[in-house]
Amino acid sequence: VSGTPIGLIAGGGSLPLEAAVAARGAGREVFIAALRGSADEGAFAGFACESFGLGQLGGLLKAMRARAIREVALIGHVVRPGISDLKPDLGLLRHLPALKAAFERGDDGLLRGILDILDQEGLSARSVLDLAPALTAVTPGPIGRHRADEAAARQIALAQAALEALDALDVGQAAVAVGGRPVAIEGPEGTDEMLLRVAVMRERRRLRNGGGVLVKRPKRGQDLRVDLPTIGPSTVTRAREAGLQGIAVTAGVTLIAQKAETIRLADEAGLFIEALP
Amino acid sequence: VSGTPIGLIAGGGSLPLEAAVAARGAGREVFIAALRGSADEGAFAGFACESFGLGQLGGLLKAMRARAIREVALIGHVVRPGISDLKPDLGLLRHLPALKAAFERGDDGLLRGILDILDQEGLSARSVLDLAPALTAVTPGPIGRHRADEAAARQIALAQAALEALDALDVGQAAVAVGGRPVAIEGPEGTDEMLLRVAVMRERRRLRNGGGVLVKRPKRGQDLRVDLPTIGPSTVTRAREAGLQGIAVTAGVTLIAQKAETIRLADEAGLFIEALP
């Protein structure tokens, strides 16, 4: 709500600053808790900002309360320590058993667990999608100049089918289909590494066909407060290097870092970016 | 059948020679058609052997007929040319439209198409599994000294679940699960590259847990005459480098190249190799 302060827990990449600017533009007072080891702490000039380790929950809560902040959002890439590297302060310590249990439950467990603890401490954790909807493709359809043709639409459906088939198994948010076949499914290596792999397959003539698409979308049942699927300029560059025709994302959910630059690069490279319903 | 001649169409790796030795041991007369660009043509000393390009079907048929061969089997890794690089001889030329259609249908289409043409020409294409069953794990259970424990069995089930979920989409024959999650699914890059990727994830601390397993099995509905799932010494070495606990294969179907050496390496590294029913 305009006027009420928001605490942004910032990881790496350009999105935290973009979210901060968007929130300020919407009339909110912004405080940034930059996560040490993840955030570029120098990026937030002009904003109130302090640094915290991921385990310093007590310190973070104190800083938020001092500013009468009741809402927080987590944004940006977080380098996740092992639970034994967390170095919990006193504020986190009493929640550690719950956090450990959450951590065991999956890849996003640690971040989700921290947000749940903030929630218990009276700080409501929001999705950055509520805070800065302009960071996504708001409506379905093409973003930028190029469109997916029918052949590309078939590859999109195939990559989606692969991701849906794996939805129950917590595998990944992205897949590439080329020539009527999913050829790469993202794991913990991340989207950029997966696209690099497709470029190598192409170089080694392991792919029969040209073209192909990248699909990036949330996992089924994804917690929209953490780890949203994200594309950005490097995704476009890697997709071009992998010889793909374009990228399909989920409207309203997949974040687009440096949107204008991402679209410009895609337009220039002849790649479509299509937002799916 | 003992006494009747067999034509082995040989690709790369050690398996073609192993199959030739096994077939001769079973009392069959063996003729080897070494595929140029794929087979190690010097490997077959002591066997009748000629070299053919994949497109020289007429020449291959003539050589087989001159030896009264009625059965053939394809074994070993085949470097697949694009259909435009096939350089068909006259014997293949009249089958080219059928082969092109088969090629369009998928990754194995070219090889399956060639076997179908041989079949039409009166040469029955057999699976190497019939010819040399000892090249697989014949019965379910552990091969070698180590066994999958309960935790490993759970990872095996997860990797299998991922492969089964993707069965309809013609993705791959292998997957790795670590820490309750499939972390790598094989595409056209092949099993060794996939294991290398897991080793890199581990090095970059992208995997929460130690251990994990590789599962390698045929795709559903796989044509057992071509492209059988295969493991060998390099699979064990890469699995060890990826920090895995072991390898699960399908009894009676997954080929094991240099079986004794593969088992020795696994025993030495503390890895299990488990044949699944």
Image (spheres, coloured by chain):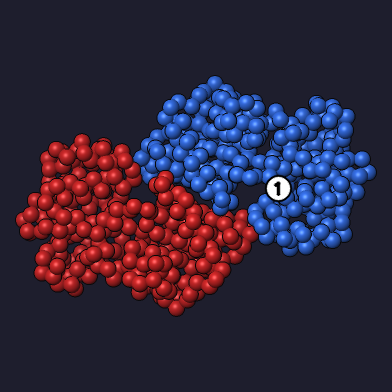
Chain colours: A red, B blue
Q: Which secondary structure, mark 1? A: loop
Say if residue B216 shows up in the picture: yes
Front residue of B197 and A100? A100
Say if residue A237 shows up in the picture: no
Above/below status of A28 relative to A229: below
In the rendered structure, the answer to whether residue A210 lies left or right of residue B133 reads left
Front residue of A119 and B46? A119
State the residue at coordinates (63%, 29%): B137
State the residue at coordinates (38%, 45%): B206
Amino acid, disc 1: Val
Residue B127 in picture, x, y percent from top left: 74, 39
State the residue at coordinates (42%, 50%): A167
Q: Which residue is mark 1?
A: B78
Q: On the image, which quarter does residue A8 sit in?
A: bottom left
Q: Residue furthest top?
A: B145
- Quarter containing the N terminus of chain B: top right
